[in-house]
Image: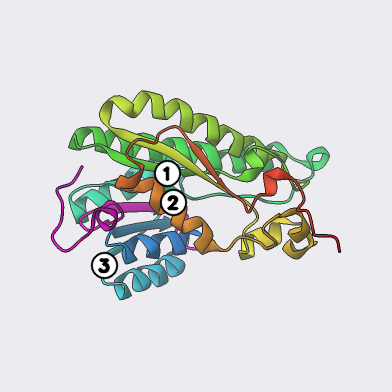
Amino acid sequence: MVAKKAGLSRIQQLLDFNGRVAIVTGGGRGIGPVIAVAFADAGADVVVTSRTKAELDKVVKDIEAAGRKGLAVTGDVGKAADVKKVVNAAVNKFGKIDILVNNAGYFPYNMFLDMTEADWDLVQNTNIKGTFLFCQAVARQLVKQGKGGKIVNIASVEGEFPITAGRTHYHATKGAVINFTRGLAKELAQYKINVNAVAPGLTDTPGAQAMTGGYGLASFGDRIPLGRLGKPEDMAWPVLFMASDAAEYITGFTLFVEGGMLLGRGWKRIG
């Protein structure tokens, strides 16, 4: 636990990220930029990575507008050499890593009977192999630093309960992320590295809109008891909590952030 900082209450201190360095994968689009800028707003310096430099550069500008330092590093999360490049760049610029958020994800629409081996492999490489590679590379750095750290994997409500058709490859990977998080948490606890997951429900992003196969996210609204789709900000705050000192005694846990979707359809008052 960090020493108490002057001018901060106990609660503010637990949620303060000043002096921390976070890596956010998939940081160029969807919920990734919102997570990255939320860390910056809370005081962290942030490394964002994805395959598209222009998107990352915009996020870095937003991080800097929040008064923190940002770094954009392009790469494919499914390639070990690219993962190593990102981790080395983070350490070279900031001298350390404290937090990893595995947000990169791929969810194309492929009905199972038409799915090819290439379709399957592409989703596996991004969603679970990429999570493995980044967790291993960052965990090795955290062990080397000797001060612990936080890893937050982005799973999905569909890793627990498939909602949309044409996504069996995605369902498989997100279920794997949930159980991988549990096993990794058990292995890394001895190094004071907390490993948790946040599992978003249906969230209003361009990628999620495409995921519905043309039906539109609004058609799923009546499945959510809280009565609305999630917003990227709804996912960012739980990620920050899991990466904060307030979550020191939580590891191996998946937090479902889905408006009650797993409870089934909402009930409406009659009369």
Which sits earlier in the primary sequence, circle 3 or circle 1? Answer: 3
- Left or right for 234, reference 90: right
Q: Are marks 2 and 1 in contact (CB under 8 Å)?
A: yes
Image: magenta residue range: 1-29
**Image coords of residue 34 (percent x, y):** 46, 64
Q: Which residue is mark 3?
A: 68
Name the residue at the bottom extreme.
65
* Crowding at mark 2 (Cα within 10 Å: few <14, some 14-19, many 20+): many
In the picture, the quarter occupied by the C terminus is bottom right
Q: Which residue is mark 2?
A: 239
**Image coords of residue 195 (percent x, y):** 40, 36
Q: Quadrant of residue 84?
A: top left
Which sits earlier in the primary sequence, circle 2 or circle 3? Answer: 3
* Crowding at mark 3 (Cα within 10 Å: few <14, some 14-19, many 20+): many
In the picture, the quarter occupied by the N terminus is top left
Specify the amino acid type for callout 1. Answer: Val
Q: Please tell me which residue lies in front, 193 or 134.
A: 193
Specify the amino acid type for callout 3. Answer: Arg
Q: Which residue is mark 1?
A: 152
